[in-house]
Image (cartoon, helix red, strand yellow):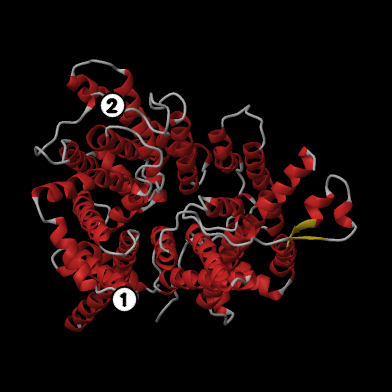
Amino acid sequence: MNIITGLLVATIRMSTPLMLGALGEVFVERTGVMNIAIEGIFLMGAWGGFVGAYLTGKLWVGFLFAIVVGVFCGAVYGYFTIKLKQHQIVTGVAINILTLGLGLFLYQLLFGIPLLPLTVEPLKDISIPFLSDIPIIGSAFFSQNILTYLAVVLIILGYWVLFRTPLGLIIRSTGENPEAVDVAGINVEHIRFLAVLGSSALDGLAGAFYSIGFLGLYTNDIIGGRGWIAFAICFLGNWNPLGILIGSLIFGLAEGLSVFLLTSNFKLIPNEFLIALPYILTIIATIARRQFNVPAFLGKPYIKERF
Amino acid sequence: MNKIDSRIEQSSISQDNNTWFNFMPVFSVLLGLLMSGLMMLLLGYNPLIVYTNMLSYAFRDIYNIADIFAKATPLILTGLAFGFAFRASLFNIGAQGQFYIGAVMAVACALKLGSLPSYLTLIICFIMSLIGGSLWAAFIGYVKARFNANEFLVSMMLTYVAIAIMNFLLVGLLKESKGEYPQTDVIPKNGWLPSLIPHTRLHWGFVLALLIALLAYIILWRTSLGYKIRMVGFNRDAARYAGINVENIFVIVFFISGAFAGIAGFTEVNGMQHMLIEGFNPIIGAEGIGIAILGNAHPLGIVLSALLFGALKVGGNLVLQTSRIPASIIGITEGLVILSVILSYYIRDKLIILRSKKKLAVQERHRL
């Protein structure tokens, strides 16, 4: 495997969870709710995935459990922000603090403090016959694990749902003009709550990608801000699934580059700078991207008129 | 929201100052402790025993009591960092990074200055950590003002950059002379903050933190700058129409907020650790957010909440050394306390509306 192929493989692998997380964030923010708990849900997803897979020995149980855990966290977040109409950023930060303790606590409770981190066999790559034999790009695009394929399919499906179906129209209107949606007889809070649950399911799956999709272990700093990066990609991709596809690939490249250079023998740039690269890129992109298509009611709870 | 509701909201904010709403945070702390107690119960521990042990350990002797205040010192400062910006409706969730930059500046000054008189070393460390933290944060305010960048994201991302810078220095320029671990040498004695109570870990940094909390109060409620800051927090557009340069306020608020977090780095390095170790105090920024929320972003509330968190840490750590409960239960308790604070905000708003509705109804009846 030559350098370019290795880099491409790493890029696409690292962009997979970002695609999943950012896609969920696009949907939920289109309904007017910011899912700030995303970082915490990533972490709980990573935990759930590892625990499910380790205890049963089956990876699919891990992924399923990660989704369940993610949805549960999302339900708590949704209850506070949508039902009780509390501040989204404050609630999200609280949940992120809570999960930081919870992930470690539940891990140590189940497994004690093992001398070496416990491992599971991570997800295997699926090579698509013939296509994966194409030189240079073949193994990058057609020899990835199933979640990567799923993420791409979901993004295309998400684009179609959001812009080509009545459901997508409802979702977009809920963020732009919740009153109109309410008058049309659709329950705004239900739509938003379902969107939070859906995005949290994707976040849980994305988190599990880190623990059992490719590393095969769980540590408490396994996510290390990747949730925030997915959150940023949603902004930078202009709340459009195709935009986040490009955004995720760019950040995947930054991360792939740092992983790749860390494991290779080039010592041109200090490792610490490479680790910081995706975060610096996020800052630059946030500054450079001026024109946003922000949903009008993003972050504002919907309070129904009462007479 | 209909007319009556908005009238109620306007009237209720001003007249609510006398009642037991002030005790709301106490209730929410108890609720948080209750919830984490339930969790311990589910896991087969008796929460009553755990909590009484925590209390008795935390207040066992003067050393432990002093430790509560020592642990609270940086928490007061990171709490102020979030709380101060929160008063302007800005979200500085990057206090962790500003704290690290302040700590790096303090340790670098203390190590490289040599044999200056103690007070001079301390003043230089203090000023440099302040400058480090505040410039690091002022960048957030600047990009917010100039490019309308999301301050929330930028401050979070800058934390990871700060960690990278710190780790880079710890394996390079500032690495210990033995060269084994990613940490610095112990700083010379003339850079140590003198201790407040002999034979304990409590140092003068605690007094400094209290003074800074007082300063934050004075800035916010006794100066015209503070008035502008709070006005921007209440209603950004109204503040702009009133002629306030909102963009300037963004930069100033982040500058001050970052200074608080940077000083926390100074008190931790010069007062507590006397060296810099990779990854130390990794959630002090997050705890600061919780403390600020619990303390209603008011300096006095922040000091009290920080003391509570300090006691939780001291008591918790000691209990956990003697039992099998993982230490991370403290983090969970903190998270649950914050969630119940948010819950209490909801209940308070409900009660206020309910009570004012009654009052309005009475007034209407009198009028008729």
Q: Going 33% across and 63% down the picture, which residue do you hit?
A: B329
Q: Name the residue under label 2.
A: B187
Q: In which quarter of the image is residue B270?
A: top left
Residue A296 visible in image: yes
x, y percent for residue B325? 31, 65
Looking at the rendered image, the quarter that the N terminus of chain A falls into is top right
Is residue B163 left or right of B125 when viewed as pictured?
Answer: right
Q: SS of the residue at dot 1? A: loop
Q: Which of B344 and B90 is in front in this view?
A: B344
Amino acid tagged 1? Gly
Packing grade of label 2 (10 A; few <14, some 14-19, many >=20) is many
Outermost residue on the front side: it is A115
x, y percent for residue A304? 45, 75
x, y percent for residue A83? 43, 75
Q: SS of the residue at dot 2? A: loop
Q: Which of marks 2 and 1 is in front?
A: 1
Q: Going 35% across and 59% down the picture, which residue do you hit?
A: B328
Using the numbered discs, state the Cα–Cα distance from disc 2 to disc 1 in whole angstroms: 45 Å
Q: Name the residue under label 1.
A: B44
Is residue A262 left or right of A55 when viewed as pictured?
Answer: right
Q: Nearer the viewer, residue B297 or B187?
A: B187
Packing grade of label 1 (10 A; few <14, some 14-19, many >=20) is few
